[in-house]
Amino acid sequence: MRAPWPMRPADELRDAVEAYLGTLSFAPDLGALEGPLRYSLESGGKRVRPVLCLAVAEAAGGSVEAALPAAAALELVHTFSLVHDDLPAMDDDAVRRGRPSAHVAFGEGVALLAGDALLAEALRLALTYESNGVGRELIGASLGMIGGQYLDVTGDDDDLARVHRLKTGRLCLAAVLMGLEVAGVAEDERTVWLALGDDVGLLFQVVDDLLDGDGYAARLGAEDARQLAQEVASRARARLDELAVDTTVLRDLVDMLAVRTG
Amino acid sequence: MRAPWPMRPADELRDAVEAYLGTLSFAPDLGALEGPLRYSLESGGKRVRPVLCLAVAEAAGGSVEAALPAAAALELVHTFSLVHDDLPAMDDDAVRRGRPSAHVAFGEGVALLAGDALLAEALRLALTYESNGVGRELIGASLGMIGGQYLDVTGDDDDLARVHRLKTGRLCLAAVLMGLEVAGVAEDERTVWLALGDDVGLLFQVVDDLLDGDGYAARLGAEDARQLAQEVASRARARLDELAVDTTVLRDLVDMLAVRTG
């Protein structure tokens, strides 16, 4: 089924996310901490989660404009996790996408506070909606991410699938659910969408591991991990076929996630 | 004016907070990170913010039971700030209320994640309410606290009153506003309450500084700081006189805050 209006392609959705993030106002109380927040957000990342949220919202009959705060909130939570993960007490990464990571650029204390502020600002954005469903999905995913990071830090990660479902899958699933919330899709009409969210999260993670040579790629071997990614992508496309809406943009997104090289 | 039912005294409200915090369920996704969260919450603190929230809710015609999630959320945000402030990158405090601080007990990485989880759990509690007003107040106060901490860390704190208003005042004010939200007090009936919230926050901070010998006590001298505390307490009592509700418990709370020794 095609929508009665032209759907925006994924690269236009990404431009919309970048534009929204670039003009985002932070709480005045944060003062000059705004600088480290903007630095961390201007990462040149792929914006997969917010684009997924916008594409789902539009496919499900909502508007991109209405979904932008939710989409941006997802990117802020993702960025919060990167800023805290890069700290010396965690992964101790000095470089993030070719630039000094936040704690190298601003010091550990400021990076810690910048991460805290990104999480809080994400929730502030999620609570600009009349109903608190968007905020509930985002906070559930944030707690899942933190739980996954804890398993990683403590080395209690013998269940790779569980760690990855928490660290990556929960926020991808939240992207789908927040898009549905904004579009006003009833809870009992979300079954296929939920399965799609799980598949996209797993697809994203497996391809990420193939690019980094760790996680699934290390556990299964590159060949089997590549096979798994193709299977999950096929499953995601089959879910899209089940949905009685225009899923062309979501299909492009799945195709891009399956073949991305960075 | 007296309420038609007996108001619960402050120590009973504190017991209610302790009982609620003790049986609080965290997100299952957090797994064994629950331990560090409980350790940090079982601090033997005064629970000033949650008790204030409950007392305001009951004085304004709401129920203590309905206000307990909001009250607990305030204590979780307060505890989040203590756990992160104690980290080596911040104040580097090894002891918190006579026990090893979280990063000493569990390691820096786990303490970082425990703080993140406390902030996220606080918001989860705030979003258990139908309306998102409680969550909005809490997130605004959290952002203010983070902004105040940033001023502290960067040494850009020549405006002591502003730093303290952000670091302590915002969460006391949120305690009042969240109590009013739960009780369903309309926004245009909150003026006196808002002023009360500001006064209680300042009173709490000035007495804290007198006990620690820093902040206002260091800036003004102990004598003048004591004088300021008495003035602010008198002003808070005058606000209570203006409110056409039973404010006996709130009056006791102001008296306790004014003379506390720990």
Image (cartoon, coloured by chain):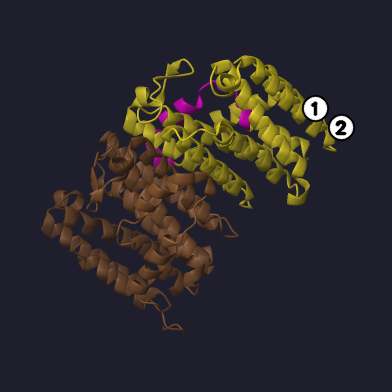
Chain colours: A yellow, B brown
Q: Quadrant of residue B22?
A: bottom left
Q: Residue at x 61, y 40 (%)?
A: A70
Mark 2 or 1 closer to N-term? 2
Report how far apart the C-alphas of labels 2 and 1 lie in the structure. Answer: 8 Å
Looking at the picture, tell me which residue is in the foreground, B122 or B232: B122
Identify whether A139 is placed above or below A160. below
Horizontal side of A218 relative to A83 (left or right) equals: right
Mark identifier at residue A70: none
Q: Check if residue B37 falls in the magenta segment.
A: no
Q: Amino acid at mark 1?
A: Thr
User: Which residues lie in the magenta part?
Assistant: A28-49
Q: Secondary structure at mark 1?
A: helix
Taking the image as drawn, is residue B98 in sight?
Answer: yes
Q: Are marks 2 and 1 in contact (CB under 8 Å)?
A: yes
Q: Residue at x 29, y 34 (%)?
A: B89
Q: Check if residue A40 falls in the magenta segment.
A: yes
Q: Residue at x 87, y 32 (%)?
A: A2
Q: Badge 2 local density, few (<14 within 10 Å), some, or many (20+)?
A: few
Q: Quadrant of residue A179?
A: top right
- The spot of residue B125 in percent (x, y) is 51, 55
- The spot of residue B209 in percent (x, y) is 20, 54
Q: Chain under label 1?
A: A
Q: Residue at x 54, y 17 (%)?
A: A212
Taking the image as drawn, is residue B188 in sight?
Answer: no
Outermost residue, right side:
A1
Looking at the picture, tell me which residue is in the foreground, A89 or A66: A89
Residue under numbered circle 2: A2
Identify whether B71 is placed above or below A37. below
Residue under numbered circle 1: A248
